[in-house]
Image (cartoon, rainbow, N blue to C red):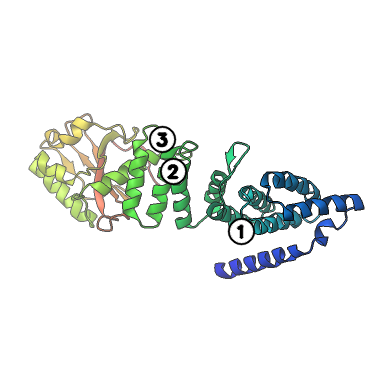
Amino acid sequence: MKKSTCISILFLSLFLMLGASCSKDMYTAGMDKVQKSEFEALASSLEKSTDYEKNYIRMMQIYNFLEKKEDPELLSVFLTDYVDNHPEDPFNAYYLFTVASRYKQQGAAPFAHYYFSRILHSYTDVTYQEQSIHFLCLKEILGNSQDLDEKIECYKELINRFSDKINPGEIYFYLGDCYGEAGQWDLAAQAYKKFLSESDATVPGNSSAREYATDFEAYYTTRVTWSYASLDELISNVTAALKSRKSSEINKYTSKVKFFMSSWEEQEASQENLATTNIASFINNSTRVNKELDKISNAQEAYLKTSGWDFRMNTWYFYFRRINFPANPEIHGNWEWAGIYLGDRVFSRSNE
């Protein structure tokens, strides 16, 4: 069944259910005479009153009546009916939040989402137990929505209205991700930049968030002249540059986004800055580049063994990788020379 059809059926059901609210008998069914009389008196008072603080007290009393009923929909119908008939009541956001929360508990996620969104866009915020109802609605929507435009607006709302209740850096990172998924790369870059400006910002469950945002900003702001669609062409140029023994020639082909030199056991972040800017000084007459790629190479990463170096270890493996950066179609999928692993490979980095 198509999503639009499901939504239509959902709201048709909602309309029919709320249409039944005109019958008061369904609320009092099963009550004894005393309970029925008390309920009807409360309901009648609500209809006539615009003293919304007193109405709130009456609503809580009605809540106690209806939450005990076997039909869990009755309370929701009563609350939504009241809101529709009292659009100026400042507590409406709270009443509808109760409805949304009940639907959530019942597993009726589309109904819950409808009300969380309705509260956010149509009703004045209200604080309940020191919590902003709008803030709670934003969290609920973001926890369940798959709509990028909706998520972007919610993240922006959190930043603009509730910066004291959130980790701004974390939210900027999520916002950047959403903009990226939507193909809005300029806005994604701006969001990641703001994330990086929060020096202590972290993203729970994503330990590489800062690295990703840093790389994104670097690729986005740097004119990438060192990438090639053909790996063979890149390796051929690197090999020719090595033969020239000129650092200026060799450096043309090194990635300008975190080019590294490390042993196999080290992390890429452990860089040999001196070596990476002076590769030519470690070349001698016995330096050789293999003609074939190492067998652990694949469609995304390639390793090329070289030997005869005068720095730390005799054997170096040149590491090449495809650039994964859809924000720039001109370089996305191209190959770059990303770093150097020092020493012989003593373990497998992929299935051999």
Disc 1 and disc 3: Cα gap in Å? Answer: 33 Å
Residue at x-position 11% and y-position 39%: 247
Image vertical order of residue 196 relative to residue 43, above or below: above
Q: Relative to the observer, which residue lies in front, 327 or 38?
A: 38
Amino acid type assigned to the residue bearing label 2 in the image: Ile
Amino acid type assigned to the residue bearing label 1 in the image: Pro
Residue at x-position 60% and y-position 36%: 130
Q: Earlier in the sequence, mark 1 or mark 3?
A: 1
Tag 1 near tag 2, CB within 8 Å: no
Q: How many C-alpha atoms fall within 10 Å of the one at disc 1: few (<14), some, or many (≥20)? A: some
* Label drawn at residue 159: 2
Label 1 SS: helix
Residue at x-position 45% and y-position 57%: 149
Left or right, 238 with reference to 270: left
Q: How many C-alpha atoms fall within 10 Å of the one at disc 3: few (<14), some, or many (≥20)? A: some
Q: How many C-alpha atoms fall within 10 Å of the one at disc 2: few (<14), some, or many (≥20)? A: some
State the image coordinates of residue 318 (x, y, percent, origin top left). 24, 43
State the image coordinates of residue 269 (x, y, percent, origin top left). 31, 34
